Image (cartoon, rainbow, N blue to C red):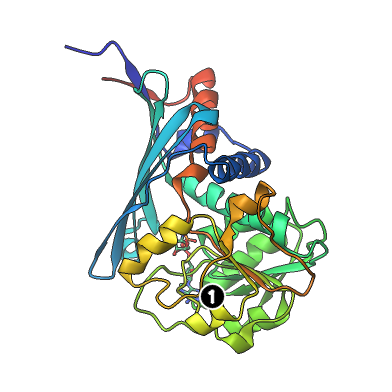
């Protein structure tokens, strides 16, 4: 017997067809982080598994009363995907109404993930970077570099140059074309250190792998730095993190949880969460010379608002397929 209920299925094309603006996603992510800071959400630690240090599987969920929904995302990521013609990251997001608990939508999670992750970095840059910064750098010039370019243009009004480092020179060249087409000057550099030396705002978006050589040491850290890492601490030696004046994350609980998987081993204590700074209940940048690093783990509270907005717009426009439960 059926439930007399249908779920809306949105594949990647349908999700993208909504064209939810990056400015809206930044607002929704910031609202989600503030709700978390005010203690008004539920968000258990991520469910995390790894196969042979080569492929991870992650589940994350959050309930946000302000948005009226709960979302759960189930994803996997691996370098092995490229040889199969797949993107690094694949997965699905389940959106349930708080009213009746039913699954309102099942949607491809990759577009939301790429956009909301960059939006969370934009929230960090908006609240923490020195406001006149004319450039930012990326360590890793893939999907996330592209969404970060889109997001950071909303919070860096003086942006002129984008510095690019990638271990794969072809990826750096391809991203340089994207930067040029967006009206900014790309500068490809030949080392990660050059990014730290030549710009005060940087995003590290390379690989999440526990057993890697972590290059960033204390002498890489300059006054005024704002670094956002979306690849956990895979670039950072503990000494590099200790040299930072203000170390933040989007979720302290997730930092503790992931230590069991050999990330953030020996890291210094964190000052607090990005949402606390956005909500005005914790201090972020106190002086222009502070060095700040934000380790954004990418948590479910950042997905719920965007998933709701995509579902409601898709429903109104008749996008996607109805699946009877
Ligand atoms: N924290 C979050 O919220 C969040 C969300 C989504 C993705 N991520 C992570 O962000 C990272 C990038 O994702 P993506 O979708 O852009 O992947 P991608 O495969 O599209 O791009 C990654 C790029 O980084 C390059 N790279 C790998 N190691 C590097 C290194 N040590 N230095 C410089 N470049 C390096 C690769 O050559 C590639 O061009 C992944 O680790 C992913 O797991 C985090």
Quadrant including the N terminus: top left
Is residue 54 visible in the rendered image? The answer is yes
Residue that appears at 83% across and 64% down: 132
Q: Is mark 1 within 8 Å of ligand 1?
A: yes
Mark 1 surroundings: few (<14), some (14-19) or many (≥20) residues within 10 A = many
Residue at the extreme bottom of the image, as rendered? 219
Q: Position of residue 238 (x, y in %)?
A: 48, 80
Q: Secondary structure at mark 1?
A: loop
* Quadrant of the image occupied by residue 26: top right
Q: Position of residue 67 (x, y in %)?
A: 53, 29
76 over 82 or under it: above or below = above
User: Does 317 appear above or below 223?
Assistant: above
Q: Identify the residue at image location x=62%, y=89%.
A: 219
Residue 272 place in picture, x, y as percent: 57, 60
Q: Is residue 150 visible?
A: no
Q: Residue furthest left?
A: 1
Residue at 47%, 66% (x, y): give it. 231
Residue 94, quarter of picture: top left
Q: Assign the C terminus to one quadrant of the image.
A: top left
Residue under the image location 48 percent in, 48 percent down: 113
Residue 130 against residue 116 in the figure, above or below: below
Residue labelled with disc 1: 166
- The residue lying toward the viewer, choosing from 114 and 292, is 292
């Amino acid at each position: 017997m059926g439930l007399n209920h249908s779920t809306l299925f949105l594949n990647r094309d349908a999700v993208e067809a909504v064209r939810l603006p990056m400015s809206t996603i930044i607002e929704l992510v910031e609202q989600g982080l503030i709700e978390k800071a005010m203690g008004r959400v539920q968000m258990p630690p991520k469910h995390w598994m790894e196969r042979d240090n080569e492929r991870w599987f992650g589940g994350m969920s959050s309930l946000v009363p302000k948005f009226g929904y709960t979302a759960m995302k189930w994803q996997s990521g691996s370098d092995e995907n490229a040889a199969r013609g797949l993107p690094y990251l694949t997965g699905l997001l389940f959106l349930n109404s708080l009213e009746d608990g039913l699954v309102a939508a099942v949607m491809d999670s990759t577009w939301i993930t790429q956009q909301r992750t960059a939006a969370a970095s934009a929230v960090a840059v908006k609240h923490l970077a020195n406001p006149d910064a004319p450039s930012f750098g990326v360590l890793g010039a893939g999907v996330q570099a592209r969404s970060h370019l889109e997001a950071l243009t909303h919070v860096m009004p003086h942006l002129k140059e984008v510095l690019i480092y990638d271990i794969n020179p072809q990826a750096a060249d391809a991203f340089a074309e994207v930067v040029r087409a967006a009206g900014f000057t790309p500068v490809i550099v030949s080392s990660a250190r050059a990014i730290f030396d030549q710009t005060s705002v940087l995003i590290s978006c390379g690989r999440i792998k526990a057993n890697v050589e972590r290059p960033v040491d204390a002498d890489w850290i300059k006054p005024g730095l704002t670094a956002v890492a979306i690849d956990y601490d895979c670039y950072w030696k503990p000494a590099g993190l200790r040299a930072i004046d203000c170390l933040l994350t989007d979720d302290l609980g997730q930092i503790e949880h992931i230590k069991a998987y050999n990330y953030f081993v020996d890291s210094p204590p964190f000052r607090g969460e990005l949402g606390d700074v956005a909500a005005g209940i914790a201090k972020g940048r106190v002086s222009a010379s502070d060095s700040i690093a934000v380790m954004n783990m990418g948590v479910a509270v950042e997905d719920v608002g965007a998933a709701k907005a995509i579902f409601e717009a898709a429903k109104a426009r008749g996008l996607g397929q109805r699946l009877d439960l």
